[in-house]
């Protein structure tokens, strides 16, 4: 059984037992969270699509860690104008272990 969930403005296809990295969620490490924004639930050839959410469907997950992704380097340059700009960014993430999909 799998589900399509929405968190942090992004959509993820998840199944029980998977590990995913999502946008930062304010939760402690080891805490169990319930994601109720489920867009679709599937089981084999059977698929239930919400309008926009599936009523009563939830996904339970455990927070494994909080961290930061690798640095993304931004470099802007205008040729012949003596202009160069360097910038870096590290995005925060939360790593989740999906424990169950209820649909």
Image (cartoon, helix red, strand yellow):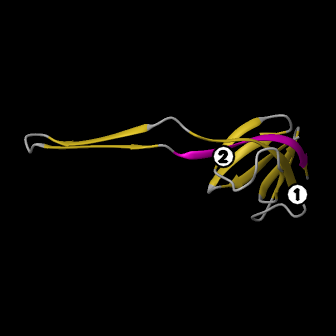
Measuring from the top left, give residue 89's x and y in whole percent: 43, 44
The quadrant in which the N terminus is found is: top right
Q: Secondary structure at mark 2?
A: strand
Image height check: is 69 above or below 34? Answer: above
**Is 71 placed left or right of 87 in the picture?**
right
Toward the viewer: 8 or 92? 92
The residue at 70%/56% (across/down) is 26
The residue at 83%/60% (across/down) is 54
The residue at 46%/37% (across/down) is 71
Toward the viewer: 39 or 20? 20
Measuring from the top left, give residue 42's x and y in whole percent: 85, 45
Q: Over which residues does the magenta segment extend?
A: 91-101
Would you say residue 46 is visible in this rendering? no
Outermost residue toward the left in this view: 80
Q: Secondary structure at mark 1?
A: loop
2 or 1: tag closer to the N-terminus:
2
Image height check: is 58 above or below 75? Answer: below
Q: Which residue has dot 1 on it?
A: 57
Measuring from the top left, give residue 59's x and y in whole percent: 85, 51
Q: Which residue has dot 2 on it?
A: 22
């Amino acid at each position: 059984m799998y589900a399509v969930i929405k968190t942090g403005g992004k959509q993820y296809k998840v199944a029980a037992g998977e590990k995913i990295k999502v946008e930062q969620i304010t939760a402690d490490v080891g805490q169990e969270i319930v994601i109720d924004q489920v867009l679709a639930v599937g089981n084999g050839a059977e698929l239930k699509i919400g309008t926009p959410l599936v009523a009563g469907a939830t996904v339970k997950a455990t927070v494994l860690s909080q961290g930061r992704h690798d640095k993304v380097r931004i470099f802007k340059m205008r040729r012949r104008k003596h202009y160069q700009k360097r910038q870096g960014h590290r995005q925060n993430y939360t790593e989740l272990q999906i424990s169950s999909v209820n649909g």
